[in-house]
Image (spheres, helix red, strand yellow):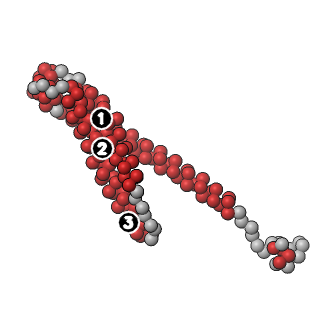
Amino acid sequence: VLRARHRLAENAPNDFEIRNPTAAMQARQQATETISVMLGALASISLLVGGIGIMNVMLVSVTERTWEIGLRMALGARRTDVRAQFLLEAVLLCLTGGAIGLLVGAGFALAIAAAAGWPVFIGLSAVALAVVFSSAIGICFGLYPAFKASKLDPVVALRDGMV
């Protein structure tokens, strides 16, 4: 029909092109999925590295505060109290880092959106998910240092802390 409307001879090349928007949409969707997977992998690695950093900070904290832990236990603190203290510290450390990350990320998103003229929406569900993940990382990577602190013998901890 197009060749007839354009009055093309039978052996003349087409002076038009037919495109299928479905193929372009599928290619765009596949590229978006690939980017999402890559960003997910990057986020997972970042969470793992951050969690290991939290665990190291908490282990150093347990080592440096051996005398304090021994004194608390000698004065009647139970193992669960010591464990809860170090878990709470790990969670608060992660929540602080998560809050800073949220602020920096939202700031970059707003700045890029303003520069490009794009609309931006930072959903409450995304913020809630970030808080949940920060807390979960704090709990997961704070468990070992908290258990290590709670297993200290008060007498040994007081003796080793005095040196």
Residue 147 percent location from the top left of the image: 27, 27
- Earlier sequence position, callout 2 versus callout 3: 2
Q: CA distance from mark 2 to mark 1?
A: 10 Å
Whether residue 139 is situated above or below residue 46 in the rendered picture: above
Which sits in the foreground, 52 or 20?
20
Which sits in the foreground, 80 or 161?
80
10 Å crowding of disc 3: few (<14), some (14-19), many (20+): few
Whether residue 3 is situated above or below residue 34 in the rendered picture: below
Q: Quadrant of residue 7?
A: bottom right
Q: CA distance from mark 3 to mark 1?
A: 35 Å
Give the SS element for disc 1. helix
Of the numbered discs in the image, which one, if any, rests on residue 111?
Answer: 3
User: Which three-letter amino acid code belongs to the residue tagged 3?
Assistant: Ala
Horizontal side of residue 28 vs 113, given as left or right: right
Residue 44 percent location from the top left of the image: 43, 43
Q: CA distance from mark 2 to mark 3?
A: 25 Å
Residue 120 percent location from the top left of the image: 43, 64
User: Which three-letter amino acid code belongs to the residue tagged 1?
Assistant: Gly
Q: Quadrant of residue 74?
A: top left
10 Å crowding of disc 1: few (<14), some (14-19), many (20+): many
The residue indicated by pointer 2 is: 94
- Please report contact status of discs 3 and 1: CB closer than 8 Å, yes or no: no
The residue indicated by pointer 1 is: 142
Q: Quadrant of residue 14?
A: bottom right
- Earlier sequence position, callout 2 versus callout 1: 2
Give the SS element for disc 3. helix
Residue 143 percent location from the top left of the image: 30, 32
10 Å crowding of disc 2: few (<14), some (14-19), many (20+): many
- Please report contact status of discs 2 and 1: CB closer than 8 Å, yes or no: yes
